[in-house]
Image (cartoon, rainbow, N blue to C red):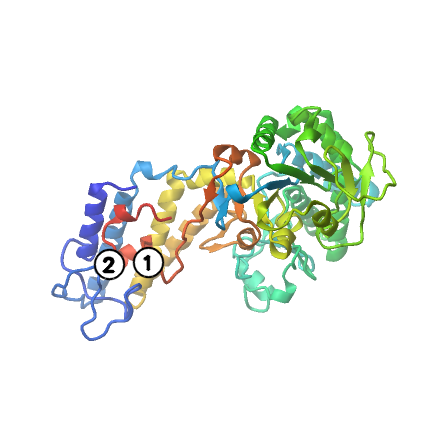
Amino acid sequence: MAGAGLRAAARRWLLCGGHGGPRAASSSPSCPGCGPPGPGAHCPGVPRSAPAQAPTSGADLSAHLWARYQDMRRLVHDLLPPEVCSLLNPAAIYANNEISLRDVEVYGFDYDYTLAQYADALHPEIFSTARDILIEHYKYPEGIRKYDYNPSFAIRGLHYDIQKSLLMKIDAFHYVQLGTAYRGLQPVPDEEVIELYGGTQHIPLYQMSGFYGKGPSIKQFMDIFSLPEMALLSCVVDYFLGHSLEFDQAHLYKDVTDAIRDVHVKGLMYQWIEQDMEKYILRGDETFAVLSRLVAHGKQLFLITNSPFSFVDKGMRHMVGPDWRQLFDVVIVQADKPSFFTDRRKPFRKLDEKGSLQWDRITRLEKGKIYRQGNLFDFLRLTEWRGPRVLYFGDHLYSDLADLMLRHGWRTGAIIPELEREIRIINTEQYMHSLTWQQALTGLLERMQDAESRQVLAAWMKERQELRCITKALFNAQFGSIFRTFHNPTYFSRRLVRFSDLYMASLSCLLNYRVDFTFYPRRTPLQHEAPLWMDQLCTGCMKTPFLGDMAHIR
């Protein structure tokens, strides 16, 4: 990543304490990475030298801190040559767990947002239709009709506190990310959020969403179809608050979710897609290429979807052709996931060529036939497809993947369409410089926090917070990245890591790898074993002086 000049610049900075001369006396009682000082204590990354005289006056200390600040800015600039950007490939597959495709004999797929990728143009249709259902069937105020769908308002993975009408982003440790709580379309001040939760940003475990994203009073929006639902919910709350109308939060939430459900249950969404597949279905040719390639290499395929057969059949004919069923060994529609994975009571039903139910008792699952409902336990008994030789792909972490990984030991792949856009943002020079300087500034604050010049430290803290807001807004002005809450992973990211072996932007990413490829997750450093962090550069405690030699570590 860096050349000889970069390595030399970093080495000079490390050896000289960041300002070209002998290292200044430590401003902190301990050195991150080297432990607390003691008799004869010495940073292994720095040669011994006579300590420089520490600043004595307040003005001298302030000047010393700002000198370190400027040195750090120059170093960060040197560390980020133009070629450092565009390091990540949006079409790559990312591994949470080591997995060899050589060992996978059976591939399973969800349909919506897995085999069939949909255009964003679908979301305004869902929003406006559900909005009109609220007005015409649930008798909500006509004024709500003025709201249109805003595609840049919400992101996937947010939580909604039903009793408080709060839409918010929560991190992996159950803390609300301040600045990301909205009631209606208006941000809620941080002080009010903390007061609402008893003087803390923390949401207790018993209030959080459960195994399938639904808690006693807080729901997590996990699928892509939930984007118009969050937008509509926020718009309706905004209207009621803006017109000082009293409402029961639980009733309003249920009415909105029921209206969204009606769009799906009544088949309206299916009709829109069927009427204009060219508009709504993306990457159909790539789906065909993935399936054909797997079959050509002797892999067995199956489909388990909650969508009805007529809809799936039309979509697969559009993407793959009239003989699409010959690619699959088993096809199951209207499976009613996630209860399909846990409820043993529902038997399989066979459908005829017209989609009508048959009454035969199912004793085997035949290739080319269509089955409805059923349950995973009968599926395992009839197919004997068990354990890590099965890899199943889906877009919903709870409904598609959680049970399969935790209860049945299947390998799982998550389809995360947002990943492509987020990686493109990460690859920009603006993001890279903002994040790197933010990390460096954090290291300065940690190292110099015992200094007496509180005004300098306060200025650094203010700049750090501004940088965090800038970085957040690059992804989404209201809620930021779906993967990060500033420095912590989001709750969504935590579930993604827990429930998926692999994740990718689309199924077509498989075309970039051999069918016997082994995915190795990067050894992401734990806090106590990080070999190279930007914020350590300001401490001069690097035990590995050559940055270029560490470029392969991610």
Residue type, mark 2 in image:
Gly
Q: Which residue position holds label 2?
A: 540
Depth check, mark 2 against mark 1: the one in front is 2
Q: Is residue 262 visible?
A: no
Count how many numbered circles sit on residues in the image.
2
The secondary element bearing badge 1 is classed as: helix
From the viewer's perspective, tell me whether residue 432 is left or right of residue 401. Answer: left
- State the separation of the CA atoms marked 2 and 1: 11 Å
Relative depth, front residue between 70 and 52: 52
Q: Amino acid at mark 1?
A: Gly
Q: Which residue is mark 1?
A: 443
Relative image position of residue 145 (x, y in whole percent):
73, 38
Q: Is residue 423 above or below residue 344?
A: above
Left or right placement of residue 350 versus residue 328 in this view: right
Q: Secondary structure at mark 2?
A: loop
> In the drawing, what numbered circle is on residue 164?
none
Q: Earlier in the sequence, mark 2 or mark 1?
A: 1
- In percent of width and height, residue 280 lies at 65, 29
- Residue 472, image x, y percentages: 47, 47
Q: Residue furthest right?
A: 359
Of 321 and 539, the residue lying toward us: 321
Left or right, residue 534 beside residue 242 = left
